[in-house]
Image (cartoon, rainbow, N blue to C red):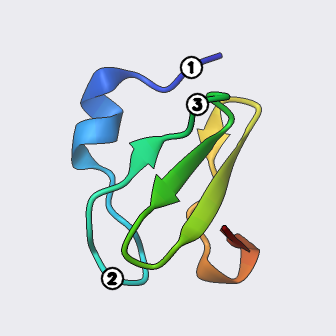
Amino acid sequence: MTISKELLEILACPKCKGRIHLNDAGDGLICKNCKLLYEIRDGIPVMLIDEAKPI
C-alpha cells in the first residue's frame, strides 16, 4: 500500500517541520535535514520521533 500524493504534500517532519519524501523502497518517509527515516506500517506513516531510525 502506498501513501497518496496529497498526504505526502501535507506531511512534515515532526522534529524540524521540514519536507519529507518517500524512500526508494516505498516503505518509509525520509527527512534529509534530520537524517531520519519514519517507517510506514500497514499503510500508515509512523511519525513519532522516538520511533524514527537514523539514516
In terms of secondary structure, where does tag 1 sit? loop
Q: Which residue is mark 1?
A: 2
| Residue density around tag 1, few if under 14, some if 14–19, many if 20 or more, within 10 Å | few
Q: Amino acid at mark 3?
A: Asp
Which residue lies at the image location 44% right of the left edge and 63% below the top edge? 31
Which residue lies at the image location 76% right of the left edge and 31% below the top edge? 42
* Residue 24 circle label: 3
x, y percent for residue 47: 56, 63
In terms of secondary structure, where does tag 3 sit? loop
Total numbered labels: 3
Say if 30 sits above or below 3 in the image.
below
Is 41 on the left-hand or right-hand side of 40? Answer: right
N-term mark: 1 or 2: 1
In-front residue for pair 43/33: 33
Rounded to the nearest whole Å, what is the CA distance between mark 1 and mark 3? Answer: 12 Å
Q: Which residue is mark 2?
A: 16
Whether pointer 1 and pointer 2 mark residues with C-beta atoms closer than 8 Å, the reply is: no
Rounded to the nearest whole Å, what is the CA distance between mark 3 and mark 2? Answer: 22 Å
Is 48 on the left-hand or right-hand side of 8? Answer: right
x, y percent for residue 12: 32, 61
Rounded to the nearest whole Å, what is the CA distance between mark 1 and mark 2? Answer: 24 Å
In terms of secondary structure, where does tag 2 sit? loop
Q: Quadrant of the N terminus?
A: top right
**Labels 1, 3: front one:** 3
Say if 39 sits above or below 24 in the image.
below
Say if 39 sits above or below 44 in the image.
below
Q: Amino acid at mark 1?
A: Thr
